[in-house]
Amino acid sequence: MLIKLALLLRPYQKQLVVALVASLGATAANLLQPWPLKVVFDSVFQSKPLPTPVAATVGALFGPGPTGALSFALVAILVVACVGAVSAFVAGWLMTRVANSVLYELRSNLYWHIQRLSLAYHDQRRVGELVGTLTTDTQPIQDLVAQGLVGILVSGLTLIGMVVVMFALHWRFALLALSIAPLLFALTYRFTRRIKRATRDIRKREGEIAATAHEVLSAIRIVQANTREDYEQSRFEWQNQQRVSAGVQARTLQSALPPLVDVMVAIGTAVVLGYGAHEVLAGSLAPGELLVYLAYLTMLYKPMRDLSKVSEVMFRASVGLERIFAVLDVERSVRDLPGAREAKRLRGHIEVQHVWFAYGDRRPALADICFDVQPGQVVALVGATGAGKTTIASLLPRFNDPTRGSMRIDGREVREYTLASLRGQIALVLQETVLFYGTVHDNIAYGRPEASVEEVVAAAMAAHAHEFIERLPDGYDTLIGERGATLSGGERQRLALARAMVRDAPIVVLDEPTTGLDASAEALVLDGMGRLMRGRTVLVIAHRLSTISRADLILVVEHGRIVERGTHDSLLAAGGRYRELFELQSRGQVAVPVGGAR
């Protein structure tokens, strides 16, 4: 934990040095607090003279005798208190600024990293857990830096200073006072290990709650349509109860530690007080010295109490760092290679040569895939669900990299291009249209924010979206709900087509964009697709074979292999798997052809 925390704090060395100096000032004030009381007790009440070097200065500033000593003691109390207060404020203010900066940088870096992790990683993680790591797990680090570090620093320095002063004053007292330290540290160590385990369990349960809530609320239509509200409520309550149980266990441990520390401290205080009183009665120790020593003893045990009380913040931060770095330490499986070049405007010549791909250690999802697409051609991938069509398409923008084989665009391996420039040349229209909370204009221009209003409107008109957009309350400035829930499926898909058109990419990937649409919506989307495809290299994934009858090349995919290839007419004439699928789908259907008009 300390190494990881040091890495986060490295950019703020200057602020930390100033905070350290301020903490030393606060520590010095703590160490000086008992001495004015000794002056009052010995030099005012018992008229004992001050030490010679001090007496001359006090006499010159405050006058001779007990009155001068009292004035000196009162001023000293105020000065020590002011120095301590100012030092503590400066240290706390600086650490608060550092803590907020650390939180900002940590969340920004974590978000940057999560966005760039491969889709294979995201496919295995629940979104709610990642959101929890980004928000809930980062907060304790801020709390530790803002509150815990200053407290630990001041308490630690004070503890060391107290031990040194106490040994200098009376080594026997120091040994008696520290006799409980081994038991105290053993007790603290045992409890803190259990507290850390309990805190880790709490964060695990909270992550599960966040993931479940995100999953259910994202699919609330399905939940309500299937009347599963009670089931989801019981599932949520069970997870919530697990979190409560973990929280009770952790809180019990956290609540038990300070009282046990107080009992140990009381034992140590009683031993020292008994021994000191005996020494005073025997005449070998002045009452003022015992008073100072008891004050130091109280201050010695206070840092021990404080350190036990910050254990909750420390272990929440420790568990948070574990979970955060568990994500940050994941290497991006898809990244820019050294020497990768910017992809200029591509022509769209795609060559796929003997490509294999597997998800993790599972059997290959693709096996020996080969095909060639000339610039401006339309290639369709057809086959049953799970055949590997989407996997093939995902290799083009490098959402995944082939296990072996070669995928080239314009004669270069796709890995030779930088990710950003490669993906900037490819427009995607997915089966499930994703829209963001924002205006219609912002959603259309999402892939090219610098697009002008005229370009956005032109793209919407080409995608047959302009008419329904104009009917919205604020037109292109209308706010649409999360994921476009206020729009119909056809309207969402036409916005997706407009987004792809604004991007003006030379390569287009259409992943079953008409699935789930009615006939009228499908006709509009298909016409928009035809306009989008003109003059571009297009990879179409389609279940409805009637929509790809004019494709330049059709690839039939089964179990990760291309089993047939050709044009619509040649595949029908061959009488193979494509013809079988086409005849099954064409019964009762009206073909709405989409072609590769160039």
Image (cartoon, grey):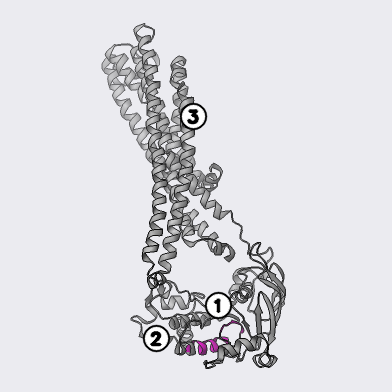
Viewer-nearest residue: 559 or 200: 559
Q: Secondary structure at mark 2?
A: helix
Q: Is residue 349 magenta?
A: no
| Mark identifier at residue 314 | none
Amino acid at circle 1: Leu
CB atoms of marks 1 and 3 within 8 Å: no
**Which stretch appears magenta?**
524-543
**Residue on which the image places disc 1:** 428
**Residue on which the image places disc 2:** 468
Front tag of 1 and 3: 3
Front tag of 2 and 3: 3
State the residue at coordinates (69%, 65%): 339
Amino acid at circle 3: Ala
Amino acid at circle 2: Phe
Is 104 drawn above or below residue 353 in the view shown? above
Q: CA distance from mark 1 to mark 2?
A: 22 Å
**Residue 447, horizontal then vertical, whole percent:** 51, 75
